[in-house]
Amino acid sequence: MLFNKLAPIAQVHLHNANQTIHCPICKHALENNLQEIQPCEHLVCVYNQEEAEFTFIEAEFAQRLKSKGIQFNEFDGYVLAQLDYQDKLLALEQTRMGSWDRQFVVYQVS
């Protein structure tokens, strides 16, 4: 029997377009007031599901994707599980009120 491994993803819904999530380790805001990514040392990637592209990707994470040859249509917990980070990542799916935008934000927590 084959079991799919999935990395858990927390759902975060922001009630205001100006809100942003913060790093769970250093509390650094993900975005500035212009909604531009402001990476901290723990941020691994930010993937926009609607645009199907990374708006930020850390070098080691990009290398793991490339070296494992992972192809995907939707970035999700299955993709993350294939990258061998074990329990070192915290993934958040961020949505905002009044927007169809969905972002996956991934932090390295250990």
Image (cartoon, rainbow, N blue to C red):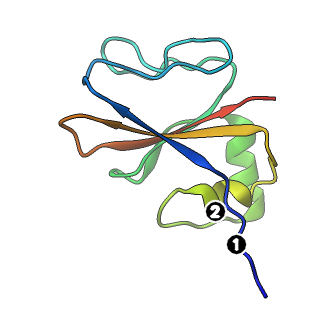
Q: Is residue 45 left or right of residue 41?
A: left
* Marker disc for residue 78: 2
Q: Residue at x 42, y 41 (%)?
A: 103
Q: Nearer the viewer, residue 29 or 4?
A: 4
Q: Is residue 38 left or right of residue 78?
A: left
Mark 1–mark 2 distance (CA, rounded to whole Å): 7 Å
* Residue 7 coordinates in the image, percent (x, y): 67, 53
* Residue 31 coordinates in the image, percent (x, y): 42, 19
Tag nearer the camera, 1 or 2: 1
Quarter of the image that includes the N terminus: bottom right
Direction left: furthest residue: 98
Q: Quadrant of residue 33?
A: top left
Answer above or below: position of 25 versus 105. Answer: above
Answer above or below: position of 80 versus 25. Answer: below
Amino acid type, residue under disc 2 in the picture: Tyr
* Marker disc for residue 29: none
